[in-house]
Image (cartoon, helix red, strand yellow):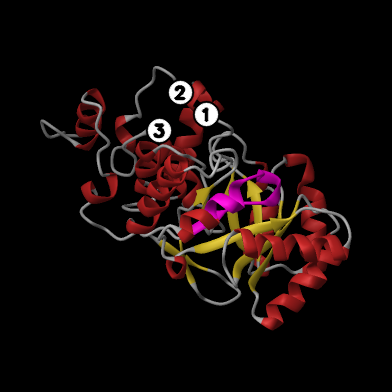
Amino acid sequence: MTHSNLNRRDLIKACAALGLAPDIAASSGNNPMRTKAIPASGEELPVVGLGTYRVFDTDSTATEIASRQEIVELLRSRGGRLLDTSPMYNRSEKVIGDVIASGADRSRLFLATKVWTDGQNSGLQQMQRSRELMQTDVIDLMQVHNLRDTKLHMQTIREWQQQGRIRYSGLAHYTDSSQTALANEMRQFKPDFIQINYSIGDRAAERQLLPMAADQGVAVLINRPFQAGSLFKTVAGQSVPEWADEFAQSWGQFFLKFIISHPAVTCVIPATSKPRHMIDNLGAGVGPLPDQTMRQRMVDYFESL
């Protein structure tokens, strides 16, 4: 392969050396972010969103809110929409509400949260509290977190969907050991979305959940795309292989594009509070994606490290 004197990878390295954050989206020829359709409605959803676990669990000081507002603005300005949170994430819902109150355009965001409690009344109160904390009348996606009291909460979610207070229903978990139970609840409750863990280093979801979601017409959000950072430890000291230059200019994009390129995946939600990482993550939403042959090459290469 012939390379120019300063290709995009060189540019990224040069910017990093200067302490700058290159605009990955702009350097992709101003391509719009890819979208995938939500099967339940046909609504197009950008393929890269933002998780808020830990990174939005902060005090609502002016400095902290301004920092998170910058992250949300980067997401929105580069074509992303989805913010995923949960009452389990402590202060994250409130921080999202503060960001919206500080000027973030709610109409251009897709707010996904969860219900994580026992009992119908407790669930009702928690969902209402989520609306208040995020300062929104409508929650785009309400997910039952970790399959906790699913039957009761899905009943409330369905009722709120009919009332226009929730747009989509979902089930969410983050462990391989939960996948059989999640598959059973998918059959029983037929959610609009599932949220699961999946990455190049943990492909258990390929065995059952991803094919099942495709067959049932269920949208899929992916959490833990970097396996809590362990993927970066595996590639420490290694450069992204030159054969991946066409679609990935960083290891983060390499890992995210592996996920996005799976046909059953709708959106991946890496968490970050760092603008440089947010920009790089969003770069995975533009440009070419690896095909099935290339995906296998990516797996083989990663497993050889």
Q: Nearer the viewer, residue 109 or 250?
A: 109
Q: Residues within 10 Å of mark 2 (few under 14, many from 20)?
A: few
User: Do the CB atoms of the residues marked 1 and 3 lie less than 8 Å apart?
Assistant: yes
Residue at image mark 3: 251
Q: CA distance from mark 3 to mark 2?
A: 8 Å
Picture quarter with the N terminus: top left
User: Do the CB atoms of the residues marked 1 and 2 lie less than 8 Å apart?
Assistant: yes
Q: Which mark is residue 187?
A: none
Residue 141 coordinates in the image, percent (x, y): 62, 65
Residue at image mark 2: 235
Q: In the figure, 79 relative to 229: above or below?
A: below
Left/right placement of residue 156 relative to residue 70 reads right
Magenta extent: 82-96
Residue at image mark 1: 231
Q: Residue at x 41, y 60 (%)?
A: 104
Q: Earlier in the sequence, mark 1 or mark 3?
A: 1
Residue 19 coordinates in the image, percent (x, y): 25, 27
Q: Residue at x 45, y 60 (%)?
A: 81
Work out which residue is located at the far top of the displayed protein and give it: 237
Q: CA distance from mark 1 to mark 3?
A: 9 Å
User: Do the CB atoms of the residues marked 3 and 2 lie less than 8 Å apart?
Assistant: yes
User: How many numbered markers are drawn?
Assistant: 3
Amino acid type of the residue tagged 3 in the rendering: Trp
